[in-house]
Each structure stands twice: as structure tokens, then as C-alpha cells.
Amino acid sequence: MKRGVVRAAMTQTRNAFPGMPATVDDLDALRGGLEALRRANVEHHVDLMRRAHAQGARLICFGELFTGPYFAHDRRPFWFDLAEPALTGPTVARLAPVARELGMVVVAPLYEYDPRVDARFNTAVVIDADGAILGSYRKTHVPHGTNERGGFCEDFYFDRSDGGMVNDHPANISKNKHFPVFETAAGRLGVSICYDRHFEGVMRTLAQNGAQIVFNPAVTFGRQSRRCWDLEFAVEAMRWNVYIGGSNRLGAEPPWTVDFFGRTGFTSPVGALPDESADPCLMIADLDLAAFGGGDGSGWDLARDRRPDIYD
């Protein structure tokens, strides 16, 4: 692989815990058993890390809320117990040594509880290839609603980002406290989470603060979301000269019947990248971080020529 190219992976999978109830009415049977559920999903993703590493990947992003099923279809307070301290909880404690062993950068989106503010967040932790925990990003925009596939009650489970996470590691090069950008062994990374991708300021802010790669781990479903999935990433990657990786779950998770459409993939400023993996749970692509350092060949300079003085 040529110098400056990073082989990156994303997961496209779903809840790996085998003990899910058969019906939604029986979900409360999970009360008190969430540690086993978390452990099953974390170990599944450790295996995916190793499988990606065997294919040459040195960077991996897991899916949104990868430590469990997507539980926000309805309101059940027992799921609060799945939340954990982002930087010191059991998930990161398991992943950091594996990241160091394999020399892989890891983006790990999980359910966070912050005891300092007694609040819960939808959060992604960034771990460097030496196992160092660089910091985290909290989901900024939190949706609630219903589409033809099902409901999403995220405002019941998650607070919107307060910008108050601990991101004082020198690897964070961003000047915006809500949108950290981390200098890692695999390049400069930013994260948005699912619904964030629909808001025009997110990719702009990450790119302007130095991101070369932006991950958008998601749990998304429905006609409108599917229609926008490829369009938004293609436009934003072109507009801001970044690689964007969108990771989505694939298929339905028992006992719910909501079908996630997958379509995990990487987009460059000039188009979608081919999948280098034959593993259905992984999407792997080669990102040439030097290819767009001097522009995308269009001759444009959008950052120079934009007119913020006349926008509303």
C-alpha cells in the first residue's frame, strides 16, 4: 500500500446478544442482565477488530450504540442501566488493550453516563493505536419521531451535547468544544453521530477544525433516511474535501421488527470508494489522505469564496 494511504474499516452488524426475548412485551426480562448483553456485543466487536486487522485495516469505527440493540424504539427506563462512564467504563477498558495490541485506532460509539452532571449521552470514544484514550464526541442533535418503519424516542434516553466532555488531550486540535478533532496514528478524525449528518454546520465545523476523515456511525431506517444516506455524504465530502464513513446496522433486531438498511460505506471528495472486504459485517476501504491535500482537481476554493456576510 502506498505511503499516506490508510486502510480503514467500519462495522455493519447488529445486536449479538443471543438471549433477547421473543416479543416486545417480554423485554423487561432483561432488567438486571444488561452487563451480559454489553459483554456479548463488545466481544463481538473485538472479534471484528481482529478480522479487520487481518485484512490490513489500521482504523475501525463501530456502529452507533454498538454495546447493545437499538433500544430507543420506545421508552423503558431499565435501559438507563446500560449507560457507562465513557472514558473509564468497562467498554473502553476492554477495547484499549486490544487497540494497543493490534496497533489500531478505534472509534467506539456507546451509551454514556456522566456522573458529574447526572446526564446520559450518545457518545463516541476515540482510542489511538497505542491504546491511549484521546477523548470523546457527544451527539449534538437528538431526534424523536416516527416514520413508516417505526419510532425513535431518543430524547427519552439522551441529552444533547453540552460540550462538557473531557477533551483536553493534546491530540484534540479543534477550537470548537462541541466538535473535537483528534490527531491519531491514522490521520485527523472527527465524528458526527446519525441525525447530526442532516445539519449543515456539522461537517463544515469538523473540516474547518482540521478533520481529514469524519465518521458517522448510525442506526437509521425509513424511506427518507435511505434516500438521503448516499446523497448527503457525497455532497458533504465534495464540499468540505474530507472522507466520510457512514456506518449503519443491517437487518432487524429481535424482538423489534424495524429493518435497518445497512449501506455502510466510505465517500471521498470525488465519489464512493470500493469495498475491499468480503466480510458481510465489515466495510473496508483505502483512504489516500494526501490525494486531496491540494484540492480535488476542480479548481474551486469554497472556503475562500463562500459569503457568510450575506447568509441568514
Image (cartoon, helix red, strand yellow):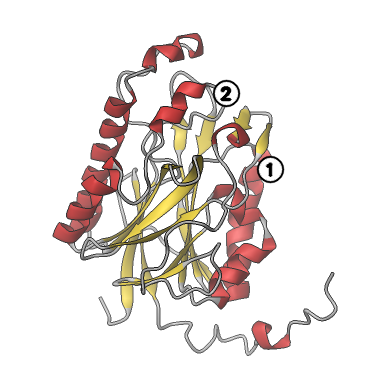
Measuring from the top left, give residue 264's x and y in whole percent. 46, 50
Q: Is residue 309 visible?
A: yes
**Which residue is at 46% across, 74% downward?**
212
Q: Quadrant of residue 60?
A: bottom left
Q: Residue type at mark 2?
A: Arg
**Residue 45 sits above or below residue 10 on the image:** above
Observer-nearest residue: 214 or 179? Answer: 179
* Residue at the front extreme, as displayed: 116
What mark, if any, has residue 183 been given in the picture?
A: none
Observer-nearest residue: 54 or 172? Answer: 172
What mark, if any, has residue 75 been given in the picture?
A: 2
Mark 2 falls on what kind of element?
A: loop
Q: CA distance from mark 2 to mark 1?
A: 24 Å
Mark 1 residue crowding within 10 angstroms, few (<14) / some (14–19) / many (20+): few
Q: Quadrant of residue 288?
A: bottom left
**Which residue is at 26% across, 64% downward?**
58
Measuring from the top left, give residue 255's x and y in whole percent. 46, 18
Q: Where is mark 1, residue-wise?
A: 224
The answer to whether residue 244 is left or right of residue 108 is right
Mark 1 falls on what kind of element?
A: helix
Placement of the N terminus among the 4 image quadrants? bottom left
Q: Is residue 270 visible?
A: no
**Residue 228 sits above or below residue 16 on the image:** below
The mark that comes first in sequence, 2 or 1, is: 2
**Which residue is at 55% across, 39% downward?**
158
**Residue 27 sits above or below residue 155 on the image:** above
Mark 2 residue crowding within 10 angstroms, few (<14) / some (14–19) / many (20+): some
CB contact under 8 Å: marks 2 and 1: no
Measuring from the top left, give residue 186's x and y in whole percent. 32, 71
Q: Residue type at mark 1?
A: Gln
